[in-house]
């Protein structure tokens, strides 16, 4: 068992558009190669039945645990390992295009460096919201990021969460 926290970029605060970018190109977009903690939300905290970071990646892409409010784990997400676990040392790991890279990083919501909005937004995302616009009822889009692209899985089944930003989706009966 591994105790972890997962952080994902909030698209509303991602002014430099670094969501889904690899670690080696961050400096070109934001002036530093270190992830900016002020744009991340904590989307999970708990103990998981995993032995490696690759196991964590698989779990958060194929079999989300209860209480998970984020999208599938992807490039630019950060996994915090709380205590040493086998060969995985405690610390923060950036999900890169191939594997994970350990980074020196302090979560904004943990240290109180933010005004608390990051944690509030992560909690708000867990409250399902309608995908229908009040004025344009036949146009569907995520109420948070306004994307219509990631609302259904590849089989056309409606997702419970937006695949772009992790917002819980309320599918109203038509």
Image (spheres, rainbow, N blue to C red):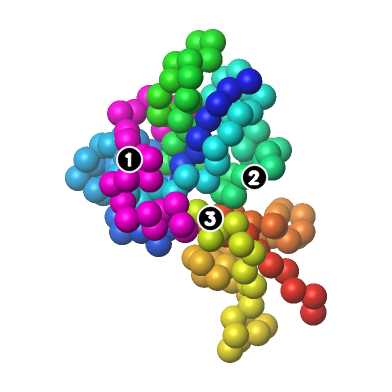
- Among all residues in the image, which is located at the extreme left? 31
Outermost residue on the right side: it is: 173
Going from N to C along the chain, the mark reached first, 1 or 2, is 2
User: Residue at the spot x=64%, y=64% of the render?
Assistant: 128
Marks 1 and 2, Cα distance to the nearest angstrom? 23 Å
Q: Which residue is mark 2?
A: 67
- Residue at the (36%, 58%) spot, across then down: 13
Question: In whole angstroms, how far apart are the C-alphas of marks 3 and 1?
Answer: 18 Å
From the top left corner, tell me how far across and down residue 51 is, in percent: 61, 18
Residue 95 appears in view: no
Q: Please provide the residue range marked out in magenta.
A: 94-121
Q: At numbered mark 2, what does the secondary structure look like: helix, strand or loop?
A: loop
The answer to which of marks 3 and 1 sits earlier in the sequence is 1
Mark 1: few/some/many CA within 10 Å (<14, 14-19, 20+): few
Q: Which mark is residue 46?
A: none
Residue 137 x %, y %? 65, 84
Closer to the N terminus: mark 2 or mark 3?
2
- Vertical placement of residue 134 versus 158, above or below: below
Is residue 115 shown left or right of residue 8?
Answer: left
**Dot 2 alpha-carbon crowd within 10 angstroms: few under 14, some 14 to 19, many 20 or more:** few
Q: Nearer the viewer, mark 1 or mark 2?
A: 1
Distance from Cα at disc 2 to Cα at disc 3:
11 Å
Q: Which mark is residue 123?
A: 3
> Considering only vertical position in the picture, is 115 above or below 73?
below
Residue at point 40%, 24% (across, down): 91
Give left or right: position of 155 versus 149: right
Q: Residue 16: horizontal and vertical position, in percent?
A: 30, 55
């Amino acid at each position: 068992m591994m105790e972890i926290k997962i952080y994902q970029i909030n698209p509303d605060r991602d002014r430099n558009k670094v969501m889904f970018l690899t670690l080696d190109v961050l400096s070109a977009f934001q002036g530093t190669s270190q992830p900016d903690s002020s744009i991340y939300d904590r989307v999970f905290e708990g103990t998981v039945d995993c032995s490696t970071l690759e196991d964590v990646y698989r779990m958060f892409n194929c079999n989300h645990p209860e209480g998970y409010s984020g999208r599938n784990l992807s490039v630019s997400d950060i996994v915090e390992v709380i205590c040493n676990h086998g060969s995985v040392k405690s610390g923060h790991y950036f999900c890169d295009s191939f594997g994970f890279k350990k980074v020196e990083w302090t979560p904004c919501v943990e240290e109180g460096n933010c005004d608390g909005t990051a944690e509030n937004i992560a909690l708000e995302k867990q409250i399902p919201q309608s995908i229908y616009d009040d004025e344009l009822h036949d146009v569907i889009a995520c109420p948070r990021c306004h994307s219509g692209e990631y609302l259904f899985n590849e089989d056309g089944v409606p997702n419970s969460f937006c695949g772009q930003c992790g917002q819980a989706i309320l599918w109203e009966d038509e």
